[in-house]
Image: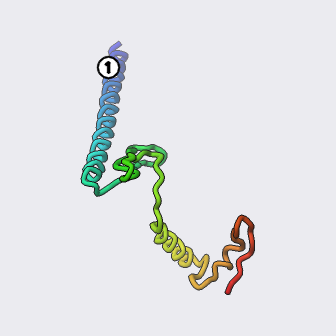
Amino acid sequence: MAEIIGRSLYCAVMCRLLVLLSAAISLSAQDLNSRFDQIAKTRADARQFMGNVLIAKGDLMLFEKSYGSANLEWEVANAAESKFRIGSVTKQFTAACILLLEDRRKLKTDDLVSKHVRTRRLHGAISPFTTC
């Protein structure tokens, strides 16, 4: 009988411990969300940042929020669906990818584009590349 009471007491204590641990983990996630929000909001209020923040770990989204304006002239607020005109920002990533491919001996920076890309679109039609 004492063994059954001991097990029951152990189970009750463990269940309470799990509930408290879950609450602590949940609280720390809320604290992190508050901290993420505070950092981004401070920058957005000072007009040093406008955009969307998404923080994830694996497939789990930890934090997502939009700040500032998508369009200052029309005072349109940013949203998760906002589209951004990024212009030339991607050129540095393209350059890094090309250098990485060269490092892996997949291509040479001296190669002509036509060596790796066989066709191109020209007014809706596909035609072969010509080199000058």
Q: Which residue is rendered at x = 59% and y = 78% of the image? A: 105
- Mark 1 highlights which residue? 9
- Position of the C terminus, as image quadrant, is bottom right
- Position of the N terminus, as image quadrant, is top left
96 relative position to 43: left or right: right
Residue lying furthest top: 1
Residue 61: image location, x then y, percent: 43, 44
Reply above or below: 101 against 84: below
18 relative position to 101: left or right: left
Between 116 and 50, which is closer to the camera in this rendering?
A: 50
Residue 88: image location, x then y, percent: 47, 68
Q: Which residue is rendered at x = 64% and y = 78% of the image? A: 113
36 relative position to 110: left or right: left
Between 98 and 76, which is closer to the camera in this rendering?
A: 76
Numbered disc 1: secondary structure: helix
Residue lying furthest front: 73
Q: Which residue is rendered at x = 28% and y = 42% of the image? A: 34
